[in-house]
């Protein structure tokens, strides 16, 4: 491998690692944030909800930026804005908390949509492999954030605000390593009305969008509330954070292996349905016996959620024929999907507040997983979305 190729791959991986810490780092600190800011459970859940709304609303900005400055410079700009957002979130005041979170999430939204196009552009012969690398990097970043924020807080004495601001460091490091790509000649991709008009007319687009939205909803519900569920079941806060980290770490392996296997054939149905059923098993474990073998429930949940996320992004990358079309499909599926997903953490918190326990919220999550299984079966069937028939 040449030095140029090595820098490309390392920069790509480090960029992927920064796509979740700004979100995942909130969950282990949520009780502390709520106490400090005087927020209710619904208000605490709204932090994640605001971020996921931004993931949906601002995703369509990515094709517009990519058509003007290129995918590589779009990613560089996103990394710099993530750094700005997490620093702002660490300042005093509830407004800074929400605005900084929204700013970081807006950058992540643009990068989320851009990454499948980057895979198609830089690694066209290895889409399956680098989709797995990308997704495993995303979940590894989430796992690292959820595992380290509390130990870092205790070691530094900075409090949750200082720990949030420290998340700017890996974003700036990734920006530095991605800089050679951004300074190179840019391939403009993703712009123009044609890709959007054509993807919106395809039924496959809406199957993929439903899968993306429902798997994101069930994922972000766990990302926002999983440690709190275990704490209220009687586990200490640090162990609850480690459980979240475990399920995210398991997702790394699942998201790396599953795309390579699932991409070998035209159909991904069996993989998608299997991932949904494993996620159901994880939810059931938390509902029926949260303190009995919690590590097992987190392993099962992690395999299911990691595989489902990777499969949704693999399908987005495989179906279209070129980076512009991939970016357009990615914008539609992720934008609409994340708007749907944004309802999850807040509604979960409201159900907890109204019902006084976690039974009703977890049953609602199981209902969403049933719908996710149907969407996965439809989205995973063989289909070809070419330039003329997206």
Image: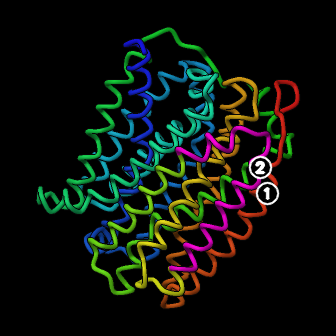
Q: Residue at x 86, y 40 (%)?
A: 201
Counting the numbered discs, the total is: 2
Q: Are marks 1 and 2 in contact (CB under 8 Å)?
A: yes
Instruction: Say which element carries label 1.
Output: helix
- What coloring was used for the rendering? rainbow
Q: Is residue 2 left or right of residue 124?
A: left
Query: Is 380 within the magenta?
Result: no
Quarter of the C terminus within the rendering:
top right
Q: Which mark is residue 31?
A: none
Give residue 385's position: percent from left, percent from top.
82, 33
| Quarter of image, res 143 | bottom left
Q: Residue at x 47, y 22 (%)?
A: 73
Q: Residue at x 79, y 26 (%)?
A: 194
Q: Nearer the viewer, residue 211 or 50?
A: 211
Q: Nearer the viewer, residue 284 or 188?
A: 284
Quarter of the N terminus within the rendering:
top left
Give residue 15's position: percent from left, percent from top.
42, 34
As drawn, 365 above or below 310 = below
Q: Is residue 235 left or right of residue 257?
A: left
Q: Residue at x 55, y 33 (%)?
A: 130
Mark 1 is surrounded, within 10 Å at the Cα level, by few (under 14), some (14 to 19) or many (20 or more) other residues, namely many
Q: Nearer the viewer, residue 372 or 342?
A: 372
Measured Cα–Cα span from mark 1 to mark 2:
5 Å
Q: Which residue is mark 2?
A: 380
Q: Which residue is mark 1?
A: 377
Query: Is 279 within the magenta?
Result: yes
Give residue 61's position: percent from left, percent from top.
59, 35
Q: Is residue 372 left or right of residue 98?
A: right
Per the rendered image, the range of residues in magenta is 256-285
As drawn, 116 above or below 300 = above
Instruction: Say which element carries label 2.
Output: loop
């Amino acid at each position: 491998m040449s030095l140029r190729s090595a820098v490309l791959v390392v920069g790509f991986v480090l960029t992927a690692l920064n796509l979740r810490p700004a979100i995942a780092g909130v969950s282990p600190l949520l009780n502390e944030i709520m106490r400090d800011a005087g927020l209710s459970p619904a208000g605490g859940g709204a932090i994640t909800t605001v971020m996921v709304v931004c993931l949906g609303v601002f995703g369509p900005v990515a094709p517009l930026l990519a058509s003007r400055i290129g995918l590589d410079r779009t990613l560089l700009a996103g990394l710099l804005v993530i750094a700005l957002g997490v620093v702002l979130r660490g300042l005093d005041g509830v407004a800074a908390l929400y605005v900084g979170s929204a700013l970081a999430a807006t950058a992540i939204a643009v990068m989320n949509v851009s990454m499948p196009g980057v895979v198609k552009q830089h690694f066209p012969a290895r889409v399956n492999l680098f989709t797995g690398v990308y997704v495993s990097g995303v979940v590894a970043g989430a796992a690292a954030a959820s595992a380290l924020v509390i130990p870092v807080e205790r070691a530094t004495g900075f409090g949750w605000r200082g720990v949030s601001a420290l998340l700017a460091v890996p974003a700036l490091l990734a920006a530095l390593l991605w800089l050679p790509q951004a300074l190179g000649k840019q391939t403009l991709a993703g712009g123009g009305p044609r890709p959007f008009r054509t993807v919106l007319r395809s039924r496959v687009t809406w199957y993929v969008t439903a899968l993306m939205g429902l798997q994101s909803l069930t994922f972000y519900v766990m990302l926002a509330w999983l440690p709190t569920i275990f704490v209220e079941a009687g586990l200490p806060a640090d162990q609850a954070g480690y459980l979240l980290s475990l399920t995210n770490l398991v997702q790394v392996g699942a998201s790396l292996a599953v795309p390579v296997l699932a991409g070998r054939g035209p159909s991904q149905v069996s993989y998608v349905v299997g991932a949904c059923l494993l996620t159901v098993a994880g939810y059931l474990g938390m509902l029926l016996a949260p303190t009995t073998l919690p590590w097992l429930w987190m392993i099962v949940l992690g395999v299911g959620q990691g595989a489902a996320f990777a499969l949704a992004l693999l399908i987005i990358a495989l179906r279209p024929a070129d980076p512009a079309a991939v970016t357009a499909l990615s914008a539609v599926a992720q934008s609409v999907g994340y708007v749907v997903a944004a309802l999850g953490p807040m509604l979960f918190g409201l159900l907890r507040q109204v019902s006084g326990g976690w039974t009703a919220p977890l049953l609602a999550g199981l209902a969403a997983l049933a719908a996710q299984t149907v969407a996965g079966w439809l989205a995973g069937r063989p289909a070809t979305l070419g330039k003329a028939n997206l």
